[in-house]
Amino acid sequence: MTNAAFVYKHRPIPTLERLLDKLRHNWRSYLANAALAAPLVIGALIMFLPLVWAVSFSFGQPHEFFKLPPPIIPSALRLDNYEAVFERVDFFRFFINSVIVTACVTIGQLITCSMAGYAFARLRFPGKRIIFILFLASMMVPQHVTLIPVFIIIRGLGMYNSLGALIFPYATSVFGTFLLKQFFETIPDELEDAAKIDGAGFLQIYRRIMLPLAGPPLATLAILTFNSSWNSFFWPLIFINSADKMTLPLGMIYLRGQDGVTNSGVLMAAIVLNLIPVLIFFLIFQRRLVEGVTLSGLKGI
């Protein structure tokens, strides 16, 4: 038997008196932690309750949930609403279009923003600071202000009513560039200097040193970009006018009845189906989300 196993096996079992004594000495810290955690728990419940209600609503009858107060759990679980979604609209076509657009936009932003962030953080060129300030200033311009110029450019390129109109203008972002620039500035210069001594160029340094270290901010950018692109409704509404090119948020308008009356249960079922890919993607990368934001905010511009 090893020493570690012997110590673990013969470790004294804490008695009730010891636990009570420890609680008496640490009750103030426990109360402080509880006071700090209570607002977080309440906020989480407030934000999580609509999602629970939407999922429950999607399995129930519409008339049940117009009662006051509405029931959290329906009287009977039914799949009629989900079956109606696939019967009324071409859900799989909308889903495939959303996957194509979101994947291209997310991958495009990861590539272009990481390259631009590396250039602003590590390279030297005339007017870099002024260019970066102007680059950041564009974040203050609302997207709706640029609607007409972007529309003219997209139509001039022949991308109107195509998935390219939803991919090309959003393959990069100012926020993503800023996020990765902040992270690249935290990497020690000695790593880059050692690579230069070994004969590595800028592209090799970017590909072999910077990208492997940039996992957390890249995961953060991927989550934010995926969520924004997947749930986008306004821009597809402007650039797409045929049903076979529509994404999921835009395709849901076909769930309205001919008289304009919408079956709320069917709409909730479509919303739940639309949320599943976002939740899965978030659960895969959520461990690096906070780490990426924290590491990218250590230094200023």
Image: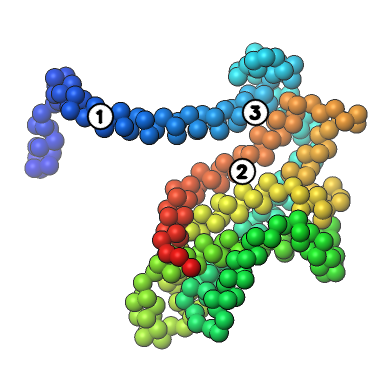
Q: Position of residue 260 (x, y in %)?
A: 87, 31
Q: Amino acid at mark 3?
A: Ala
Q: Is residue 121 above or below residue 45?
A: below
The structure residue drawn at horizontal position 60% and vertical position 31%, both measured from the top left corner, is 51
On screen, residue 46 versus residue 68, left or right, reads left
The structure residue drawn at horizontal position 45% and vertical position 68%, both measured from the top left corner, is 184
On screen, residue 85 versus residue 59, left or right, reads right
The structure residue drawn at horizontal position 9% and vertical position 40%, both measured from the top left corner, is 1
- Do the numbered discs 1 and 3 sit on residues whose CB atoms are within 8 Å? no
Q: CA distance from mark 2 to mark 1?
A: 43 Å
Q: Nearer the viewer, residue 151 or 57?
A: 151
- Do the numbered discs 2 and 1 sit on residues whose CB atoms are within 8 Å? no
Q: Position of residue 119 (x, y in %)?
A: 53, 75
Q: In this orientation, does residue 211 appear?
A: no
Residue denoted by label 3: 54
Q: Amino acid at mark 1?
A: Arg
Query: Which of the numbered marks, if any, corresponds to residue 277?
Result: 2
The structure residue drawn at horizontal position 9% and vertical position 37%, both measured from the top left corner, is 6
Q: CA distance from mark 2 to mark 3?
A: 16 Å
Q: Is residue 208 above or below residue 73?
A: below
Query: Which of the numbered marks, if any, corresponds to residue 28?
Result: 1
